[in-house]
Image (tube, grey):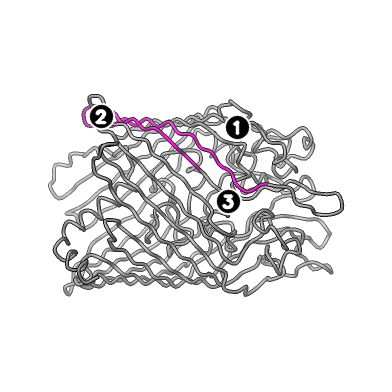
């Protein structure tokens, strides 16, 4: 080890450069923003405008598996498009305006717009369940029309910033709507200290392949600060002034299994259980961070985070309540006042830029079982907040990224890995509602296949991109590959970011980048396949229904997608 440290001391600058290059190769968009600089006539005032234009098309290639369509709660999304149907034909535009005065203060505004002329006006039910659609008369609601069809648009970032120097320290302040996601994650932050620090637009990730992280991390009204005390120590803080929920693919669309989710459908069960407004979180999230990067660590950094926050994800998607008159309603409920303490560390190991996170969460929402309701009648759960189970959980994340130099197979490349794991320490409330052993009587065996939670779970994700440069004049070709696989268990915590055991996703692609002057045009053709554990389990005399776990519920929805994007 001492020999390795000696080598590191001699190579500190090059290692820093390698670490930056690794991270950039793994997470940067392949189509660069060619910023348009507006001439202000003043050297102190800089204004730039970046615009990215993207077109996505997709076609379903999988044949419908009717074993996966076994109730009116899971039929409309699968029936909306059939094999060889076009599932997506969408245009997206994203623009950012940055203003900087003397590089000490400024503001940013961004906006996005979209239109998909292929998206239908009506949902489609399995003929067996045609009388009980989750959308009244199979007509998509205005919410679905806006976000799936369009044309529509919305503002994203809207914040001001300033840098202040005093007493030998430097303070950066931001105020307004922006997204802040610290941590060492590369692919997903379910296990990160930044979990639910900003809402996530998972819907856009589905509908606009190729969208950058700044497009899918939804800005939230907040004040954020980073105070550089000296070369080794810095303090960070966040206080939110509003609550915004994450977006998921809506029920009845090709990208969602559960037809009852979330803002679009009017029914959880038609007509018995209409969907009511969600019980959402509040403003007032607090985050405090401390970063230590002394010279003797040669660029490595250790971080400590303390947070109290409300879940931005729908913690419990479809809670059922019984009113005093006996009528039923259903609503999503977002867990409040989750507490987190976490550590982060980043370093360079054998040429790999490596990040590690470990965090402990109190009052974390756990997966809830079905078959109960809230209310004041005998036999019902008495909780006006309609909360599901909560518990204390441990989350671990490790990421690594490296660049690959020219070799006999390709000119350059990058590889990135992320390992996620979680452990349920203890259930602190709602134990009888927990969807696992001790809460759900059905969770006795075949836990993952039944969809039951386990105390421990782990998964891994990998991205590998070899590149061949100048295959033709001004043309580079690469073949990105993304894979995720569930190694063990089924995560007990909601939104833990751990793929269930045996579930998998594989997405091979070919990418062509054409440089015309200062503008790059990027073309991607990708195939997405998913699967997981399936089988029949006996549930009674002569009964052995079909079960599908995790990503196996998408096993018949493989698709081919095409993406074109450019920036100016």
The image quadrant of residue 314 is bottom right
Q: Position of residue 262 (x, y in %)?
A: 62, 49
Q: Position of residue 138 (x, y in %)?
A: 70, 35
Picture disc at residue 62: 1
Q: Earlier in the sequence, mark 3 or mark 2?
A: 3
Q: Nearer the viewer, mark 2 or mark 1?
A: 1
- Badge 2 marks a residue whose secondary structure is strand
Q: Main secondary structure of the magenta part?
A: strand
For mark 2, what is the residue?
515
Picture disc at residue 502: 3
- Badge 3 marks a residue whose secondary structure is loop
- Badge 1 marks a residue whose secondary structure is loop
Q: Quadrant of the N terminus?
A: bottom left
Q: Quadrant of the C terminus?
A: top left
- Locate residue 314 relative to residue 462 in the image: left or right: right
Q: Nearer the viewer, mark 3 or mark 1?
A: 3
Instruction: Pick whichever, 291 or 374, lies toward us.
Output: 291
Instruction: Pick whichever, 373 or 79, lies toward us.
Output: 79
- Locate residue 346 relative to residue 209 in the image: left or right: left
Q: Nearer the viewer, mark 3 or mark 2?
A: 3
Task: Tell me the magenta residue range.
Answer: 506-534
Instruction: Pick whichever, 244 or 127, lies toward us.
Output: 127
Q: Earlier in the sequence, mark 3 or mark 1?
A: 1
Q: Earlier in the sequence, mark 2 or mark 1?
A: 1
Work out whether 265 lies above or below 302. above
């Amino acid at each position: 080890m001492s020999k390795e440290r000696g080598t590191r001391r001699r190579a500190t600058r090059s290692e820093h450069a390698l670490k930056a290059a690794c991270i950039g190769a793994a997470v940067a968009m392949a189509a660069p923003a060619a910023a348009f600089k507006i001439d202000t006539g003043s050297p102190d005032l800089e204004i730039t405008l970046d615009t990215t234009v993207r077109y996505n098309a997709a076609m379903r290639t999988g044949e419908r598996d009717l074993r996966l369509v076994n109730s009116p709660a899971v039929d409309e999304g699968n029936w909306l498009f059939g094999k060889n149907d076009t599932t997506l034909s969408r245009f997206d535009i994203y623009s950012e305006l940055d203003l900087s005065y003397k590089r000490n203060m400024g503001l940013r505004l961004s906006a996005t717009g979209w239109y998909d002329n292929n998206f239908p006006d009506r949902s489609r039910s399995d003929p067996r369940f045609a009388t009980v659609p989750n959308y009244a008369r199979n007509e998509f609601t205005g919410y679905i029309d806006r976000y799936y069809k369009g044309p529509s648009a919305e503002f994203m970032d809207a914040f001001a910033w300033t840098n202040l120097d005093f007493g030998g320290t430097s303070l950066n302040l931001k105020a307004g709507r922006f997204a802040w996601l610290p941590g060492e994650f590369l692919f997903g932050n379910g296990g990160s200290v930044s979990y639910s620090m900003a809402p996530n637009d998972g819907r856009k990730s589905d509908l606009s392949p190729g969208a950058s992280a700044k497009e899918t991390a939804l800005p939230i009204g907040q004040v954020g600060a980073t105070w550089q005390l000296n070369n080794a120590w810095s303090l960070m803080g966040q206080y939110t002034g509003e609550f915004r929920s994450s977006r998921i693919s809506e029920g009845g669309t090709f990208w969602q299994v559960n037809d009852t989710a979330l803002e679009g459908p009017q029914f959880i069960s038609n007509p018995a259980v209409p969907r009511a407004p969600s019980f959402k979180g509040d403003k007032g999230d607090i985050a405090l961070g401390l970063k230590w990067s002394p010279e003797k660590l040669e660029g490595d950094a250790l971080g400590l985070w303390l947070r109290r926050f409300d879940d931005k994800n729908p913690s419990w998607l479809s809670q059922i309540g019984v009113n005093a008159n006996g009528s039923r309603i259903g609503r999503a409920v977002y867990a409040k006042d989750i507490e987190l303490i976490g550590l982060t560390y980043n370093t360079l190991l054998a040429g790999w830029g490596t990040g590690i996170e470990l965090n402990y969460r109190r009052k974390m929402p756990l997966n809830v079982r079905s078959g109960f309701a809230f209310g004041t009648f005998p036999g019902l759960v008495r909780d006006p907040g309609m909360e599901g189970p909560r518990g204390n959980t441990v989350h671990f994340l490790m990421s690594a990224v490296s660049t690959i130099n020219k070799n006999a197979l390709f000119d350059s490349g990058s590889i990135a890995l992320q390992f996620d794991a979680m452990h349920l320490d203890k259930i602190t409330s709602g134990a009888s509602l927990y969807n696992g052993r001790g809460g759900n009587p059905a969770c006795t065996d075949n836990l993952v296949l039944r969809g039951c939670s386990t105390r421990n779970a782990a998964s891994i994700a990998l991205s590998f991109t070899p590149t061949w440069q100048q295959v033709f004049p001004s043309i580079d070709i690469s073949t990105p590959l993304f894979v995720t696989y569930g190694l063990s268990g089924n995560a007990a915590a909601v939104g833990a970011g751990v793929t269930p055991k045996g579930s998998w996703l594989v997405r091979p692609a070919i990418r062509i980048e054409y440089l015309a002057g200062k503008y790059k045009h990027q073309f991607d053709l990708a195939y997405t396949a998913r699967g997981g554990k399936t089988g029949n389990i006996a549930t009674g005399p002569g009964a052995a229904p079909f079960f599908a776990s995790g990503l196996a519920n998408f096993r018949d929805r493989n698709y081919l997608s095409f993406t074109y994007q450019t920036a100016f």
